[in-house]
Amino acid sequence: MSKIYDALQHLEAQRKAMETGQTSDVGSNPLDFQERPLTLPASAPAAAPRAATSQNLLEQASAVTRFEAELHRRMGEVGLNGIQGIFALADQLHRALATVSQPELDGAEANLERVADEIRSMKDNLRQLKAVKTDLEGFTGFGNR
């Protein structure tokens, strides 16, 4: 999962560099093709391994580009602006959660527990009241005969 996150950050850094016209190196892609050995098709002639490897790299790069475009389209359908939208949403969530302290959460949890205890107590009292009422109705009904 970490490699995917790193790859998404790498893509975002590349996109930002392209938007700003920077040509600085943004580092190597964590999902670089070096991790997966390139295999030549059995039908490829032995004399042209460099051309086949180049073609394979181009095909893989094209597949990655198509995937990125499809991913961007799908994210747009749910209201996110691609990878940038995901990072913006994650940053927004991080900032929102940072405003709530652990003692506040602990206090709220303790308050809810107290309210739940009170409701349980009220429920027990109600059951007792119903039982007394049933007993009295039975006693009163017996006495009216």
Image: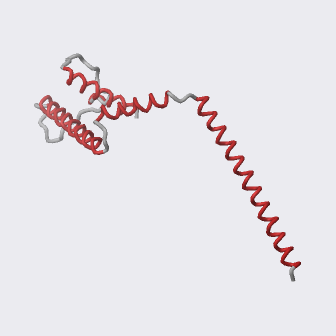
Q: Where on the picture, by quarter, is residue 19?
A: top left
The residue that appears at 86% across and 80% down in the rendered structure is 144
Q: Nearer the viewer, residue 106 or 71?
A: 106
Q: Residue 83 placed where, x, y %? A: 30, 33
Tell me if residue 68 comes above or below residue 103 in the rendering.
Answer: below
- Residue 78 in the image: above or below residue 92: below
Instruction: Indicate how the structure is coloured in the image.
Output: secondary structure
Q: Position of residue 133 (x, y in %)?
A: 80, 67
Q: Is residue 69 left or right of residue 93?
A: left
Residue positioned most to the right? 143
- What is the quadrant of residue 145 in the picture? bottom right
Q: Residue at x 75, y 58 (%)?
A: 126
Q: Name the residue rendered at 83%, 74% in the picture.
A: 138
Which residue appears farthest toward the top when viewing the image?
Answer: 24
| On-image quarter of the N terminus | top left
Left or right placement of residue 59 versus residue 116 in this view: left
The total of numbered circles placed on residues is 0
Give x and y (percent) for residue 54.
Answer: 15, 30
Q: Return the residue nearer the eye: 10 or 142.
A: 142
Q: Is residue 20 above or below residue 2?
A: above
Judge left or right: residue 116 versus residue 26.
right
In this rendered view, identify the residue nearer to me: 51 or 126. 126
Which residue sits at x=23%, y=16%? 24
Residue 60, x across and y down, in percent? 21, 36
